[in-house]
Image: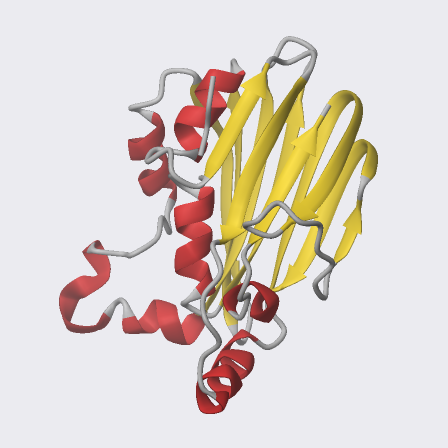
Amino acid sequence: MKIKALPFIFPLLLLLLVSCFGANVDITFNQNGSGTITLEYIVSRSLDSLGRLDGNERWNTIPVGRADFERTLSRLPEMRLLSFSSRENDRDLINSVKMEFSSIRGLLAFLDAGGRRSSFSGDAVSGSLSLTLSEGSPSGSSSLNELISKISASYAVNISVTFPGEGSLAILDRQGLAISPGIEFNARGRTVSCSFPLYEILSSRDGINLEFSW
C-alpha cells in the first residue's frame, strides 16, 4: 500500500503555508491500525476576512466550519468526526478538529486524495510513512525572502505521531539526505514529533520529507 501527501493536511498545509497560518497535527495509531487524528489550524483573521468579501464566504479556500468536515467525511466511510471547535483572538481564527479512523487505509484516504506527496508501506504492526512538507524550490530574490519571512513570522507547523510501540523519525531532503533545518524534533520513542517554523518550509530549497518508521 502506497500513500504520497495529505487531501486535507498537506494540501491544507500548503494552503496554510501561503496564507499566513500555522498547524498542529497529532496522529495516534492503535495496535489494529485504527486511531485518531487531531488537527488544529490557525488562520490569520485578515486572511479569513478577505475570503468573506463580496459575498465569497461560501467559497472558503480551506475547511473552516464543522459542516466542511462533515461533508468531506461523509465520503469517507472509515473516518468519523468526533469534535469540532473554533475560537478567535485578536489576530487569528483557531479551529480544532478531532477525527477517528477505523484503519490505516481509511486514514490515508483522508490524508492523501491525490496520492502525490506521501507514501506508506507495511501495516499497523510494522511500517513506514513518508510525508512531504516541501518539494523545495530555487532561491528567490532577497525581497521575496524578506516578504516570506514577514508573513510567516511567529507561525509554525507541529506534527506528532504516536505508535503502539517504538517509532522513529528522520528528516530528509528530496534526495534522501538527512537534514537539520531550524526545527525541533523528537526522533525516537513511542511518540515522535517535529516543529518547523513556517518560514523554514516556505523557503526550503532542497525539500523537506518526514520519514516515520515503526
The residue sitting at the left extreme is 54
The x and y percentages for residue 86 are: 49, 52
- Count of all numbered marks drawn on residues in the image: 0
Q: Residue at left 57%, top 35%? A: 130
Front residue of this view, candidates 24 and 99: 24
Quadrant where the C terminus sits is top right
Front residue of this view, candidates 68 and 175: 175
Q: Is residue 152 above or below residue 60?
A: below
The x and y percentages for residue 159 are: 64, 46
Q: Residue at left 45%, top 46%? A: 10
On the image, which quarter does residue 80 sit in? Answer: top left
Q: Residue at left 29%, top 24%? A: 75
Q: Is residue 73 above or below residue 25?
A: above
The residue sitting at the top extreme is 32
Q: Is residue 95 above or below residue 77?
A: below
On the image, which quarter does residue 141 sit in? Answer: bottom left
Q: How is the image coloured?
A: secondary structure
Q: Residue at left 34%, top 33%? A: 113
The x and y percentages for residue 135 are: 47, 54
Can residue 96 be seen?
no
| Horizontal side of residue 53 vs 78, given as left or right | left
The x and y percentages for residue 76 are: 35, 22
Can residue 148 be seen?
yes
The residue sitting at the bottom extreme is 143
Q: Is residue 201 above or below residue 83?
A: below
